[in-house]
Image (cartoon, rainbow, N blue to C red):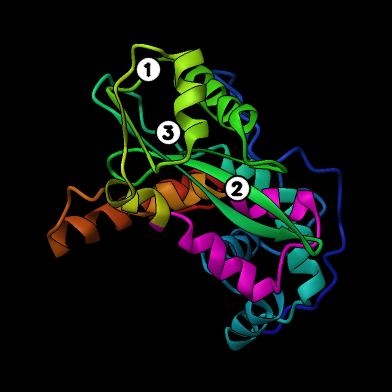
Amino acid sequence: MILLDVDITLTGWRRFGQYVGSMLLRPVSYKRHRFPPEIIAHAVWLYFRFPLSLRLVQEMLLERGILVSYETVRRWAIKFGADYARRPKRKAPTRHDIWRLDEVVISINGENHYLWRAVDQDGYVLGEIAQIQRNIKAARRLLTGLLRKQGRPPKRIISDKLGSYSAARRKIRPKAEHRQHKGLNNRAENSHVPVRKRERMMQGFRSWSGSQRFVSFSAVRNHFVPPRSQHSALSTHLHRLTAMAEWKTVTAVAA
């Protein structure tokens, strides 16, 4: 069955990456949309979960008999993406967590900026922020946001040999254990790969809001990527089945 491209509803979108503590979120509303929720949720999931362009998502939907323009997919991503991103359950912080910090250069509107990111020992993204500078102030802002978001300090902090990390750590957590070694920080460096793929696909980010849209969607990646402690194929398969069932629940799509 071919569905006509008549879904043009667009409302204001909340800032991506916004965290709503313990507040009870309202169910996702699909009012005034003629496309079923399953199609909308699937299109947004494809766009953010994989390095696909809007036109590639349009083509994948067309293969399933769904006629929708790439502009409609873009509007769905703007309207529902932020709401989806903050609904999956987050991994609870523990005193045994190890924070791995790293920064990478990204292009926004043709200018170089720095994406600062922190991941834990299992490869889950704890926080990320795009900043103009690469100095002590930027590193301090990253650590301050992590402490406020996690609610407890880590067991250990690992970073490369950039001096800004050490200086910021001395001001915020002077007694925290801090190891600086490039070889120990591979997990944080590897976490930049999805953003790099998206950047190449889009030929560079065109705006701050566009870059933040994809950067802050790491919450969805965390939801689907199994912990590194699970090595067997069966445990990975079960994890992804559970994650997909929970995804259908948070997006208000019948399982």
Which tag, 1 or 3, sits closer to the chain's start?
Answer: 3
Mark pair 1, 3: CA separation: 17 Å
Q: Are marks 1 and 3 in contact (CB under 8 Å)?
A: no
Q: Is residue 211 magenta?
A: yes
Q: Please say if 152 is above or below 243.
A: above
Counting residues from the start of the chain, the first of labels 2 and 3 encountered is 3
Relative height, residue 197 to residue 61 (above, below): above
Examine the image and state in which quarter residue 57 appears: bottom right
Q: Which region is colored magenta? A: 190-215
Type of the residue with mark 1: Pro
**How many neighbours does mark 3 have within 10 angstroms: few (below 14), some (14-19), or many (20 or more)?**
few
Residue 245 makes an appearance in the image: no
Check contact, mark 2 vs mark 1: CB within 8 A: no
Per the image, the residue denoted by label 1 is 153
Q: How many marks?
A: 3
Q: Which residue is mark 3?
A: 90
The residues tagged by marks 2 and 3 sit, at their Cα atoms, a distance apart of 21 Å
87 and 143: which one is in front? 143
